[in-house]
Amino acid sequence: MEQHRNGGACDDTRPVAVVVSEVLIYREGIAAGLARIGDLRLVGAISADALPMALAASPVQIVFVDISRSCSRDAARAARALAPQVQIIGFGMTSEDEGLAGAEAGVTAFVDHDGTIEDLNSAAKRVLSGVPVCPPRLTTRLLQRVAQLAGRGGGEADAHLTRREREIASLVEEGLSNKEIACTLNISPATVKNHVHMILDKLNLSRRRMIALDTAVSDRRSSSVASGRGGQGRRAQALPAGWRAEAGA
């Protein structure tokens, strides 16, 4: 869907950009809006799995990525590895947690779900000038995250998991698949997958199976603390693993 001004692509000096989203109407709408503004040369509105080919085929400078979806965040991480000079702009952010996951994947500018096409275009101009774009609330979370990682120790990382994330981490520890967890909690497998990605990001883990090790250490530590509370400690240890995390919340 390459857009041209007067002359051919070789004469076009505008920054080259692609839009990545798993939702066809979403990515095509954004690409069409950016093309109408005309400051960028759009060479694709693609799904995440097509991004490596797009990076190989064109001198892409900007990648717009839907960071509300874990597969697109994975694509951003892959883009960083394939083309470190590419600027990645995340759009569709609905929470600071998604922003944190995006930042760890290499996103350098953020436009949340209330943002406009003009906001995306402005973000592109700023990142190409070396200026990051980050909403104030996400900036606060990023600073907290840096402080957390800098002072991490003693196995306290799980304290930053939400109640639902602790619940899912406990079910992962029990060996349940995403589909089984979805049935247990009456949520979609895609939602479970997103939560697992967030747990991995927050605990700074690289593999799903490492969640069990991390939460097992947490459970032993929680049981040890609870044992000093008499009957409450014995009651917590008697609960199933999936409930112990909630009891300790």
Image: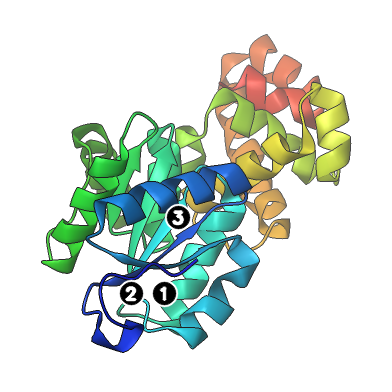
Q: Residues within 10 Å of mark 2 (few under 14, many from 20)?
A: many
Q: Judge by depth and name the residue closer to the eye, 58 or 180.
A: 58
Label 1 sits on what residue type?
A: Arg
Q: Are marks 2 and 1 in contact (CB under 8 Å)?
A: yes
Observer able to see residue 100? no
Q: Is residue 36 left or right of residue 164?
A: left
| Measured Cα–Cα span from mark 3 to mark 2 | 12 Å
Amino acid on which disc 3 is placed: Val
In screen coordinates, is 36 left or right of 195? left
Question: In whole angstroms, how far apart are the C-alphas of marks 1 and 3?
Answer: 12 Å
Residue on which the image places disc 1: 80
Q: CA distance from mark 2 to mark 1?
A: 7 Å
Residue under the image location 34 percent in, 56 percent down = 35
Identified at 68% across, 39% down, the residue is 169
Q: Residue furthest top?
A: 231
Which residue corresponds to mark 2? 86
User: Which is in the foreground here, disc 2 or disc 1?
Assistant: 2
Disc 3 + disc 2, Cβ < 8 Å: no
Say left or right for 241 vs 39: right
The furthest residue to the front: 6
Q: Position of residue 185 (x, y in %)?
A: 79, 23
First reached walking from the N terminus: tag 1 or tag 3: 3
Q: Circle 2 sits in a helix, a strand or a loop, which is it? A: loop
Q: Earlier in the sequence, mark 2 or mark 1?
A: 1
Which structural element holds mark 1? helix
Q: Secondary structure at mark 3?
A: strand
